[in-house]
Amino acid sequence: MEKIIERYRKKLGIDISQFLGLPDQFIRVNTLKADVEKVIKSLEERGYMFEKLKFCDFGFRVLNKDKIITKEVEHAVGYIFSQDASSMLVPLVLDLEEKDIVLDLCAAPGAKTTEIAQIMDNKGIILANDITFERIKALASNIQRMGILNTIISIEDGRFLYKKINETFDKVLVDVPCSATGTFKPDALISLNEKMLKDLSNLQKSLLYSAYHLAKKDGIIVYSTCSLEIEENEEVVNWFLKKFNVEIEEIKIKGIELIDGIVKNDIDKEVKKAKRVLIKGQEGFFIAKFRKI
């Protein structure tokens, strides 16, 4: 593990040793079904302690280390969703409005899809897409459990969905398959290799290519990963900026400190507008926001 820690110190200029270990528990209270204060009060009466997330009115850190909140009835009936705080940030970047037509291109298992529906108050339209029936089962289960009514599910290879629909969506979320090194799990960090990064980068670019054609003119495209790797993050964003008629926009969310994208070698300075999330107890995330022009 020391070699891996040194690799990231050289590559990213960060010491990942402070982030290793099990992440904290976080929940999102589902305001489509429940009142935030009532849910939290009920759980506190059973011994739970919470810290409210500064950037999100319905997000909480669970302070108990000896309790598993997903075993509670509130989880079973869809009053709460277990979701990392970094993951909760991503839908906020979409600047959602209730009238929007939204695509979640790689939606399973549905954490971000159901948060999008919650922010939109079950209005507008969401197309939640994923590639296999096995992945769709978890997505459909969570959509039903959380009381989502504005979402259609499709089973398509996201790389080619643009061939069936194009320039349809106001907002497109591209939360891509990735190396998951931002989870700081030893298996993900140890198994990483150059071939894997190359294959993932090609897949991520293909999904962004599709997203560009799926978005309306002036539409928003948000790209996200739970990866630490420049090859999956800044380099993919740099490719997208050079290849397509898009602008990258600043991301500012009140109540959380975000790290600018890494700009070095041949990466355009505009890529610093993309953001990394590196906070102890949370998963590491990368988020970039584009506007199709």
Image (cartoon, grey):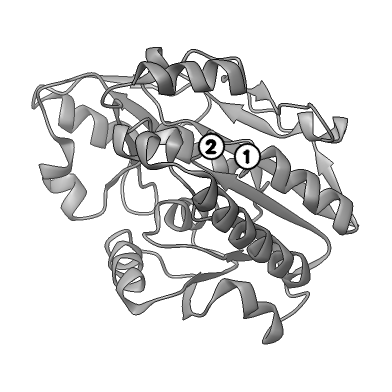
User: For the point 50% across and 51% down, which residue is it?
Assistant: 196
Q: Which residue is mark 2?
A: 89
- Is residue 119 found left or right of 170 in the rendered image? left
> Residue 8: where, in percent of width, then height?
52, 22
Disc 2 and disc 1 in contact, CB within 8 angstroms: yes
Examine the rendered structure and indicate whether residue 50 appears above or below residue 193: above
Q: Which of these two is toward me, 267 or 141? A: 267
Q: Which of these two is toward me, 32 or 281? A: 281
Q: Quadrant of the C terminus?
A: bottom right
> Residue 238: where, in percent of width, then height?
79, 44
Residue 274 tag number: none
SS state under label 1:
strand
User: For the point 45% across and 34% down, which residue is it?
Assistant: 182
Among all residues in the image, which is located at the extreme bottom? 164
Examine the rendered structure and indicate whether residue 159 appears above or below residue 83: below
Dot 1, how many residues are within 10 Å of its Cα: few (below 14), some (14-19), or many (20+)? many
- Is residue 212 found left or right of 254 in the rendered image? right
Which quadrant holds residue 68? Answer: top left
- Is residue 20 found left or right of 233 in the rendered image? left
User: For the point 53% across and 52% down, which residue is it?
Assistant: 195
> Residue 162: where, in percent of width, then height?
69, 78
What amino acid type is highlighted by mark number 2?
Leu
Disc with the residue nearer the chain's start (2 vs 1): 2
Q: Which residue is mark 1?
A: 287
- Is residue 76 found left or right of 196 in the rendered image? left
Dot 2, how many residues are within 10 Å of its Cα: few (below 14), some (14-19), or many (20+)? many
User: For the point 73% across and 65% down, which residue is it?
Assistant: 209
Distance between the alpha carbons at the discs numbered 2 and 1:
9 Å
> Residue 17: where, in percent of width, then height?
39, 14
What amino acid type is highlighted by mark number 1?
Ile
